[in-house]
Amino acid sequence: MAADDGPVAGMSGLDVGSAGPSGKGAAAAVNGVNGKDSAVAVAPDTKVSDKDGEAPEATDFANYFCTYAYLYHQKDMLEDRKRTLAYYQACVNNRACFKGKTVLDVGTGSGILAIFAAKAGARKVYAVEATDMASKAKKLVEANGLMDVVEVIQGTIETVQLPEKVDLIISEWMGYFLLRESMLDSVLVARDRFLKPEGAMYPSHAAIYLAPIWTHNKQNNRLRDYQGAVAGWEEFAEDVQRDYGVDVTCLTDDYGKEQRDYFLGTAQWTDVHPEQLMGRPHRFKSYDLKVLTLEELRAPLKERLSLRFDLDRTVEALCGWFDVDFRGSKENPAYLAVNLPTGPDATGATHWGQQTFYLGKKTIQARQGDTFEGTIEVVRRTDNQRLLAVQVDGEVVEGPRGRGGSTGQKFQWQWSIE
């Protein structure tokens, strides 16, 4: 398909490669929670705890884990007040659920969630962290006088050993569009290994949403940047031929695909205002973390998608986000359920923002009352299991849920979430 035809151009199925930097940390799952280079194994004289496990595999460390070993990154997350306050409230407003209980914090990072659990009255908190951030978490726990309650353990959750089952598991595992980073895998491993049958997960539930939006000309800017990048190659090729006598035009198509994938086929972090929404968000997937299996999580996610348009306007992009809930479990329900949303908010985005999927030149000409009916498929990238590939297929139909028939607007788009 021609370069101007948008995100589908130049892509073959959902096995797409990275067209740019992988961006902000790509989470913990297959090999651990928050990594450390396996070449820097946890030596006996550097152990944080006698329960320490193994470090993650080196490639996983380079792709993701290393980011979480720095305080600047921990600071960025802690400064997200909506995120941190939701976890704080989930703990301290549910003291009866934590009092006298054992808690496992998966991927403790700075140790802040373990400290919240201790302040809520937990008898014992095992704070597992796979990077060298574990030593700083231990330092923070000691400085706050909680060393008798919180025990920091360094190593991947798949390899650490605990002396007892726990009543609650708390973790901040969510990535962009909820599933990027694949850290939820490790949380489910922790659940299957260490959670009591009547135990609770914090958060306990999660959901993913998609909505149509207009973009304040950002869609046009992406197209213009792409066209500028392609035009710049032509000038570059002429310079190399003139100055060095080397013909690089054989790489023109490869360069064009690379830029097309990046500018038109890569989702972007955005802070979308609610006024940009052109219809109600569709919650296309929900998870109960107490019963979700690893097999279900790792399988390709394919769901029906129905987007109703409330405005007569061009749909320039689709916007995706998630929310999580802290409800406890049936056996140990939260006294005060807490919701952490990450959708469009007039007061500003969380550090997750929203993922905006630009439609390229294949925009939707929406009329009020029409709907987009189709499917969304989300799979893990084959070149990096922590990143995602997204495909949306469907058509615009007249009236709610297609009661008036097709408008003739049929689409297929593909994107990568870096």
Image (cartoon, rainbow, N blue to C red):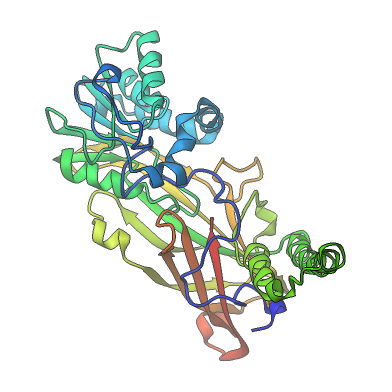
Q: Quadrant of the N terminus?
A: bottom right
Write the residue at 65% across / 48% down. 271
Q: Is residue 383 left or right of residue 186?
A: right
Q: Nearer the viewer, residue 254 or 277?
A: 254
Picture coordinates of residue 140 (x, y %)? 40, 15
Picture coordinates of residue 9 (x, y %)? 62, 77
Instruction: Say whether residue 360 is visible.
Output: no
Picture coordinates of residue 210 (x, y %)? 53, 63
Q: Nearer the viewer, residue 165 or 245?
A: 245
Task: Give the image quarter of residue 211.
Answer: bottom right
Q: Nearer the viewer, residue 198 or 43?
A: 43
Q: Quadrant of the C terminus?
A: bottom right
How many labels were placed on the picture? 0
Picture coordinates of residue 242 (x, y %)? 87, 67
Write the residue at 39% across / 26% down. 132
Q: Nearer the viewer, residue 192 or 327?
A: 192
Q: Is residue 355 left or right of residue 2?
A: left
Q: Residue furthest front?
A: 245
Is 94 rendered above or below residue 413?
above
Write the residue at 58% across / 52% down. 354
Q: Is residue 49 left or right of residue 13?
A: left
Instruction: Say whether residue 24 is visible.
Output: yes
Write the residue at 68% across / 72% down. 251
Task: Give the image quarter of residue 197.
Answer: top left
